[in-house]
Image (tube, rainbow, N blue to C red):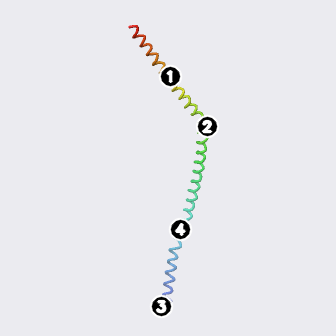
Amino acid sequence: MSEDTTQQLLVARVNHLISIVEPISGQLINLEEHVNERLDNLENQQAALSARFDNLETKVDQRLRDTRPIWENVLSQLAELHKEVEELRAETSSGFRAVDRKIRRSQ
């Protein structure tokens, strides 16, 4: 009889443990599914961002190719303008020296 009681107590404890573990197991399965869904969502978002970044890179490269000749032309014109300003400065300086010499002679 004692063996029967021990067996019944053991079965009762095992059943009690199973009743505790089963809901936890279900919760873990739900948690795993939720985590997997979130990971899939993050992977999809990362892929979308990567595609958008690649598209943006392509557009920037294209715009650089489109505007490079414009900027090269602007830089060339600025260099020419700088050269002309320097020539004008030299001519003006030379002209002022000539006027200054004439003024000194006439005094």
> Which residue bears the numbered disc 3?
2
Crowd around label 4: few <14 · some 14–19 · many ≥20 (10 Å): few
Q: Which mark is residue 87?
A: 1
Crowd around label 2: few <14 · some 14–19 · many ≥20 (10 Å): few
Q: Disc 3 marks which amino acid? A: Ser
Which image quadrant is residue 98 in? top left
Identify the secondary structure beneath mark 1.
Answer: helix
Task: Provide residue 96's location: percent of width, then percent of height.
Answer: 44, 16
* Quadrant where the C terminus is found in the figure: top left
Q: Disc 4 marks which amino acid? A: Leu
Task: Provide residue 71's location: percent of width, then percent of height.
Answer: 57, 34
Q: Disc 2 marks which amino acid? A: Asp
Q: Residue furthest bottom?
A: 1
Crowd around label 1: few <14 · some 14–19 · many ≥20 (10 Å): few
- C-alpha separation, residue under disc 3 versus residue under disc 4: 38 Å
> Which residue bears the numbered disc 2?
66
- C-alpha separation, residue under disc 3 versus residue under disc 1: 120 Å
> Which residue bears the numbered disc 4?
28
Mark 3 or 1: in front is 1
